[in-house]
Amino acid sequence: MSDDNRGLVERFYAEVISGGNTDALDELMAPDFIEHGAPPGLPAGREGFKEFVRMLRSGFPDFRWSVDDWIVAGDKVVARGGGRGTHLGEFLGVQPSGRPAEWTAIHIFRVQDGRLRERWSEVDVGGLIERLRQP
């Protein structure tokens, strides 16, 4: 079961976050999925997460996510990793800089009935925005 849960999260990162395939979320996420770290203005559910991925991929068309550490226990999967991409579009109100950007995060997923049910994120969004705005 824990291998299945990790595999589900690996697919999430590969197909959705790095690949930009928001349609895959209909299979990977429960219909009543809860994103506990939704950006302001976006709903916390699956449709809101699709909007977030489109916003992320619009701001960083070449965005890629990699995982450095995994912890899998019961219905929880914890992934510590980082993302990087080139800031070529508006992101969280910041106009494109054309520069590479990278950040780290810790994500905690809860899996239920073979689907992602909840996600919590720890990421320094303020620091990222500050770096994107630097000349």
Image (cartoon, rainbow, N blue to C red):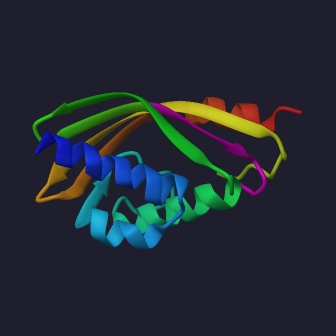
Tell me which residue sits at (80%, 52%) in the image: 95
In the image, residue 88 lies in the stretch drawn in magenta? yes
Pick out the residue farthest to the right: 135
Looking at the picture, tell me which residue is in the foreground, 120 or 1: 1
Looking at the picture, tell me which residue is in the foreground, 19 or 53: 19
Residue 73 lies, in percent from the top left, at 14, 32
Q: Is residue 40 visible?
A: yes
In the image, residue 82 lies in the stretch drawn in magenta? yes
Q: Is residue 28 above or below residue 65?
A: below
Looking at the picture, tell me which residue is in the foreground, 51 or 11: 11
The magenta segment: 81-90
Q: Is residue 7 above or below residue 51?
A: above
Looking at the picture, tell me which residue is in the foreground, 37 or 9: 9
In-image side of 104 versus 93 (left or right): left
Residue 12 lies, in percent from the top left, at 38, 54
Residue 41 lies, in percent from the top left, at 51, 60
